Image (spheres, rainbow, N blue to C red):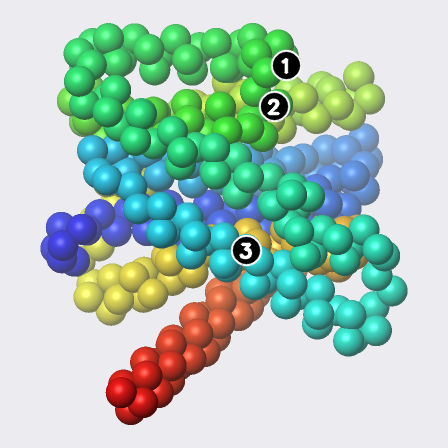
Amino acid sequence: MSSNSERNFGIDIARILAMLMVVFLHNLLNGGILRNLDINSNPMSMIYWFIENCSIIAVNIFAIVTGYLMTGKRFSYKRVIELWKIVIFWSIFIFIVFYFWGYPLKMHDIITSFFPTIMNSYWYFNAYLILVLFIPFLNAGIKVIDFLVFEKIVFCLVALSVTIGFVGHLFELEGYSGIWLMILYLIGAYIKVSPRIKRLKNTWLLILYLLCSLISVGAEYVSIKFIGGEERWLSYLSPMVTVSSICLFILLTRINIKNDKIKKILIVISPLSFAVYLIDTHPIIFNYVIQDAFRSLTSLNLVYGLIIFFIISILMFALFLLMEYVRVYIFKLMRNFVRGFKTNGN
């Protein structure tokens, strides 16, 4: 966008919130909180599951953002190369830090750190690579197709995904695939161009978002108590998760930021947010640092446990942002040094 006055800062908030939710998700599930809950003795502890179900929309929102921003625009593949460089940097850098720290790493850790894309260390980035290759085709199709036909196609794709895809028979890998990201891209494009979206009232969108999360929590409660804890509803393809993702995203796009200081902060933080995913999901951090690190919170008073959970998660998020900010600053200094050296050399 050409100027801050034209920029939709709600999209920046959506990006940032989605990455914060990723930290919540990993700390809850991989951190051991959800696996260590005793809902029989303390049913109120299901509030952790509510947070999980409110946050599971993070990945969907991040992909919807891409569709909303990129529809009708020319996609620069240089951006993909830049993202790839960031992926490689954090993958190798984190390995080096832990290696010299004396952490007992395995050969598999070394291989996945140096070859993150081949070893699928970051599934979202791998799926994103497939998406970006199709963006020119998707945009060309959206441009020439009749709106009502486009609307029906999006509706049918979503309907198939949250039904046949949800039960695992549409080859969408439970949402961990480029196919699902392409459908989310089309959803984002539809939200941007559809006049129907503007008629949806904020109150109903918020109610639907919370209601879908509550229904998912209820389904999880039944699953844990009577079926044995199958996490069926914690799926990107879940109809409740999909509806929640769409509702919250639309709400976020309607946020009107007027304070210039907040705008400047969002402009700085938003581009850094993707690195939060890269750092938090790094196999070494994910499998060694986060693994069961928060299970002790379930033994605390519920209020204290929740407060500590949010404080730690937000601090982790802030730390990861700071790490990426420092990387960007150092790389900028290096580029300026190289340019200055070339200029003086000439």
Residue 172 vs 295, above or below: the answer is above
Whichever of labels 2 and 1 marks the residue nearer the N terminus, that label is 1
Q: Which mark is residue 87?
A: 3
Q: Position of residue 105 (x, y in %)?
A: 84, 61
Whole-angstrom CA distance, mark 2 to mark 1, is: 6 Å
Residue 217 seen in the current view: no
Identity, as a three-letter code, of the amino acid under mark 1: Gly
**For mark 1, what is the residue?**
168
On-image quarter of the C terminus: bottom left
Distance of label 2 from label 3 (alpha carbons): 23 Å
Q: Are marks 2 and 1 in contact (CB under 8 Å)?
A: yes
Cα gap from disc 3 to disc 1, whole angstroms: 29 Å
Judging depth in this view, the residue of 234 and 146 nearest the camera is: 146
Label 3 CA crowd tier, 10 Å (few <14, some 14–19, many 20+): many
Residue 223 relative to residue 266: left or right: right
Relative to the observer, which residue lies in front, 241 or 179? Answer: 179
The residue at which mark 2 appears reads as 174
The image shows residue 289, relative to residue 254, as above or below, that is below
Residue 169, by quadrant, is top right
Check whether the beta carbons of the residues at disc 2 and disc 3 lie within 8 A of each other.
Answer: no
Disc 3 residue type (three-letter): Val
